Image (tube, grey):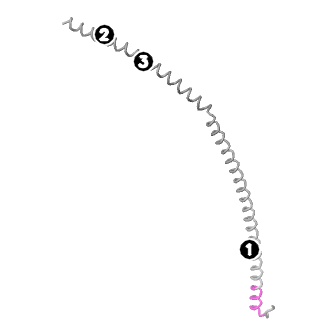
Amino acid sequence: MRTPTIALAGVLVALGLSAAACSREDATQIKEGAQAIGGEVKQAATDIKNDPDVKEAGTAIKDATKDAASELKQTASEAGDAAKDASADLKQGAKELGDNAKQAGHQAAGEARKAGKEARDEIDGNPKTS
């Protein structure tokens, strides 16, 4: 019984060693392939970086961004000025409205005093003096 078990163990060890050897060989091939691809990717990135068309496109994007930022800054400044003007107009309108309300209040108080005096005079029997 021991002999078949030992034989089976020997076969399994032999299969394991051949699989391990194959795996090392495959791993080496994969590593070399990955290194080659990495070098190609690096070279392609360098080629793209140095491509005059890509550089020109980058410059165009940079210039367009500067122009857009400048226009945005100008528009924001104009909007700020308009807001200040509107605020000043609103403040002036509110002041005028307050002044008018104050004047109307004084006028109403004067008329109320006059009406009260006339009512007292009428009650007291004094003739109306207008």
x and y, in percent, of residue 119 in the image: 74, 88
Q: Secondary structure at mark 3?
A: helix
Q: According to the image, label 3 marks what residue?
A: 27
Q: Please identify the dominant SS of the magenta region.
A: helix
User: Height in image: 62 above or below 98?
Assistant: above
Q: Secondary structure at mark 1?
A: helix
- Report the amino acid beneath label 3: Ala
Position of the N terminus by quadrant: top left
Report the side of 74 relative to 19 (left or right): right
Say if mark 1 contacts mark 2, CB within 8 Å: no
Quadrant of the image occupied by residue 82: bottom right
Towards the viewer: 83 or 70: 70
Q: Residue at image x 20%, y 8%?
A: 4
Report the side of 61 relative to 21 (left or right): right
Q: Residue at image x 37%, y 12%?
A: 21
x and y, in percent, of residue 107 in the image: 77, 79
Distance from disc 2 to disc 3, alpha carbons, whole Å, reads 20 Å
Q: Read off the magenta span.
A: 115-125
Q: Is residue 121 magenta?
A: yes
- Report the amino acid beneath label 2: Ala
